Every structure is written in structure tokens, then in C-alpha cells.
Image (spheres, grey):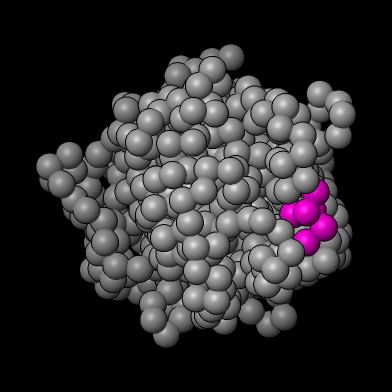
Amino acid sequence: MPPLKVLFVSPEVEPFIKVGGLADMVGSLPKALTALGHDVRIVMPAYGSLKRDSAWHARPDPLGVDVGTEAHWARTWENVLPGSKVPVYALEHEGFFGRPEVYAGPWGNFPDNDLRFTFLCRGALNLCLQLGWIPDVVHCHDWTTGLLPLLLNTTLRHTPLGQTASVFTIHNLEHQGYADRRVLSFAHIPPEEFRTDSTESVGAVNQMKAGLYHATKLTTVSPTYAEEIKTPAGGFGLDHVLRYRAADLLGIVNGIDTTAWNPAMDKYLPRPYNQRSVEAGKAVSKAALQARLDLDLDPHIALFGVVSRFASQKGLDLLAEALPHVLERMHVQFAILGAGDPGLEHVFRWAAEQYPGRVGMHVGYDNSLAHLIQAGSDLFVMPSRSEPCGLTQLYAMRYGTPPLVRSTGGLVDTVSQYVEGQPAGTGFRFNDATAPALYNTLGWACATYYDRPAEFHALRLRGMNQDFGWDVSARRYEELYQWAVDARRATPLP
């Protein structure tokens, strides 16, 4: 396959700015594609919280961005993804990106998010023209870049970018980027694109819908999620669009950064370990985790870990409902890290106070603690109602911590069911999104841990032996990009 020029446009890029799994993908996949010989570059916003150390340098030429009715200019900062030669360009604009947050502040979503991310889309394309670097394909991510494929199909169709293909990845269909019609005029998109088979939904512009209709090819972050979103139950009102585009939709499971998440080399662990030393290494991490979260220092108790956003989508309300019953009837501990819904935060704080030594929690995000929970826990709990792909279950298996998950989305594609008495499975799965179903599965996992230690050890090793790197998925994206380029170039100009 000939080398391709691929531009990633994203609101988040690990390790610079991260809100969720989107950042992890954009921070990892370009490295794997570069290793395959492709010319990959990334454009992101320069938020006020972006730490511009000496690795960043400003390009001398200001970047004009063709949006609105007035002149808009950006300063372009340049860096590379750590451990690679992948160029990263961050667009600085005080009015749109000077605030430290990505999507929302203390009072909710920013009311100008439509304009902010339109500026990102058009700025990324204008930067390509300024650099004289015309990508073969632009890889867009979620609603924040939903107008970019539409720009390529309309306003920019008769420019040097007119033959550039687009791939649009759905990370979470639930968030669709509804906006006022002003965003179309701001982007210089023809007003006739405000129609039901382009951008319009319930009288507003739906930026996710724009990406779904106008991208050359579509992907989601797991095959099962690709099927779920084509149904009324999982489509959040866009299932008809996804059924219409089904021939162009492909589910590709996310990989993980196997350097950052490697128990044999993890700087956050008191004693790194591999498959041969997993029991001893995890025992040391377990003791350190218990000490850090004021849990009873008990090497034999089953310790369940949770690292999650506190939200009903993540099934944390199911855990909150089941937790008192679990703690009253099972010999277990919980190590919980996360933030989000205030009601769920209150419940988990209450549990930590009501069951001292049994429940430890930290509100917020702490990267070192996240690594320690993965290593020090015996099992990892992820009872999501919906999970497009999920990464923490992949980290858990890599660290020898069998995950306990609900059978949805990418969790189905990545966690195979443990079968008692057989050398099969990498974790525990349950179907119904109910507290009793979660309670029963926690009990099943406990029984396996206490009563079948040899099988539990084998379960750990099977998880650690899985390959969750980006190599296989990168080759699937490589094929998809070429498919998109061929399709774009076969489409005549209007």
C-alpha cells in the first residue's frame, strides 16, 4: 500500500489534553500508522490549560481562519507526540480556546461550543493550505468535527482540498452537538444544507448528523457498538442515518498505549511485574493501594477496583444500589476513583464512612492512583449501561486484574466469559442492567477468587496474554483510509 497523508482533527489528544478515551485513541493510533510508513499529523486546540513548555514552539506566520464575517486569526503552536515524530499543531485563539476547560465550565456546556469547534475544523483545513500539505484523508472524531466533512463536500469542494477523503469516528453517539443555524453561516456552509438529510434535527443543526451524512467512511470504536447504534434503542435518534450509511460503517476496536500501560515497566507501581511474577507483584501493589486509601491491610481479601466517571451511562448507579448489600454479605473491599454525578459521589463517600477499612475512594482523577488500582485490585468493576469501546477493562486485563463487565458495546468484543472448570475466558460478564444482576456477578467473581484459586490465577494470565496494542487495528484503519481515498477520487466533482 502506498504511503498516505493523514490528518487527525480532535478536541483532545493524550498526553496534552484529555477528557476521555477519545484522547487516548488520538494519542496512540497516529504513532502506529507512522510506524507503517504513513505521514500523519494532528491538529487540536491550544486551550488555556495546555502546558506549553519548551517542547512547543510557535510558527512565525499567523493563520487566517475563514469563519464568520470578520477576520479571525490563530497562532499555531507545534510539537510532536512524545516518543514519536508525529507533528502536533495546536491552534491558539483567546476568544475560543483561552479558557482552561474543553467542553464545559462550572455552569455547564459552553454556549459557543458550536463556533469554537467550527473554528477548529476550518482552522485545521486552512493550516493544511498554509503548509502546502494536502492530506489524502482527514480523520474526524465525534460531533466537534462533524462539520468538517460537510465543508469538504461543499465550501471547499473546488479547492486543493476537494479530493481529500474524510473518515468520521463515532466515540459516543449520545453527544450530538446540537446548535443554532448560525453555525452554518459562521462556517460559510450553504444554507440549503439545513435539511433532514444533511444537518437538521428537530429544528436545530446536529453536528454529529452532519458528520454521519457527509463523511466518506464511518467507523465506531468496536464492532458490537457499530451494530447497537443502528437500532432504535442504541441510536439516540440517528439509527435511521446509520442504517442508511451501513455499507460505509465499520467497527474497529481501540487499542491501548502498551508503553504507558505496562505492568513490567510502570513507574507508578512499587514493584513492577510480568506474567511470571504476577502474584508477587500484585501483592505488593495491593498492600500499597490498601495503605493509600486507608483500607484494612489484608492480603487475602478480594479487592475490587473502580476507575470511572460517575454516571448512569457507566452503570455506577447500579453499583451504588448494590454496594451496601455486597458489603454486608461478602468479604470484600472496594477501591474507587472517579468524579461526576454529585449524588453518586455522595453515595460512595457515605459507603467509605459507613464501612471504614472496606471502602476507599478518591474524588477526581489521579493518574498514579489509576495505575495502582489496576495493579493492586484483584478484580475490576465496569458495569456500563453503554460502552462504545472502553479502555479501562483493557488496562485491567493487561495488569492481571480480571474485569467484571456488563455485556454491551466494546465490552462484549474485548472481554470473553469465564467458564468454570474450563480454560476459557478473561473476565465475568452479565446481561441485565440491574443491581441484582451486578450483585450476583460480584458474588460469582468472589466465589471464583476464594474457592478456585488455580482457575483464578489462570484467568489472570489469559488476560495478560491478550494483545491490545494498536498494530492490528492500525492496519484496519490503513485499509479503510485507502478505501475512503479510492471512493472519494471516484466521485466526480459537481
| Left or right of 24 in this view: 236 | right
Residue 485, percent across and down?
61, 31
Q: Which residues are magenta?
A: 439-445
Which corner quadrant holds the N terminus?
top right
Q: Residue at x 82, y 58 (%)?
A: 440
Point out the residue furthest to the top here.
Answer: 1
Task: Say if residue 399 shows up in the picture.
Answer: yes
Residue 231, percent across and down?
86, 59
Pick whichever, 261 or 350, lies toward us.
Answer: 350
Q: Residue at x 83, y 66 (%)?
A: 436
Pick whichever, 109 or 388, lies toward us.
Answer: 388
181 above or below 456? below
Residue 441 among magenta residues: yes
Residue 66 among magenta residues: no
437 above or below 345? above
Point out the residue furthest to the bottom here.
Answer: 107
Residue 309, percent across and down?
54, 63
| Left or right of 296 in this view: 51 | left
Residue 120, percent across and down?
39, 58
Q: Residue at x 25, y 64 (%)?
A: 48
387 above or below 396? below
Q: Residue at x 48, y 56 (%)?
A: 296
